[in-house]
Image (cartoon, grey):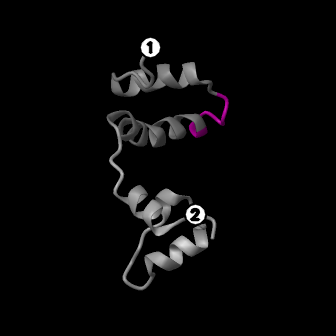
Amino acid sequence: MFATNDQLFITESVAAARVCDLLHVSRSEFYSWTNEQRTDRENKDRELLPLAQDIFWDQKRRYSARRIQRQFAVQSSRPLFSQ
């Protein structure tokens, strides 16, 4: 299984105990992680990351963080990184 923790989800067909065994974590840790509240910064990062990655790949992986920031500002009038 090549998934990050964020990509895993529990369905009725997969028991949480089985997932915990596969990941070698306790069920209490797993449930703590699934019920965790994300900060505003984490939510903003999740929103902006795909946009920054699109810019990076569109420019053939040649753009630095500063150039991505400038390009993002041109496209959306919002800064990518706060300074």
Front one among 1 and 72: 1
- Image quarter for residue 60? top right
**Would you name the residue on which mark 2 appears?**
3
Give residue 39's position: percent from left, percent from top.
34, 38
Number of other residues with Cα within 10 Å of mark 2, as a class: few under 14, some 14 to 19, many 20 or more = few
Q: Residues within 10 Å of mark 1 (few under 14, many from 20)?
A: few
Element under label 2? Answer: loop
Among the 4 quarters of the image, the one containing residue 23: bottom right
Residue at (51, 66) in percent of width and height? 26
Seen at 61% across and 33% down, the residue is: 59
Taking 41 as reference, is 30 above or below it?
A: below
How far is mark 2 from mark 1, CA to CA?
33 Å
Residues in magenta, as a range = 57-62
Work out whether 63 lies above or below 36: above
Residue 59 magenta:
yes
Residue 46's x, y, as percent? 42, 42
Q: Is residue 53 above or below residue 29?
A: above
Disc 1 residue type (three-letter): Gln
Q: Residue 14 placed where, x, y %? A: 45, 81
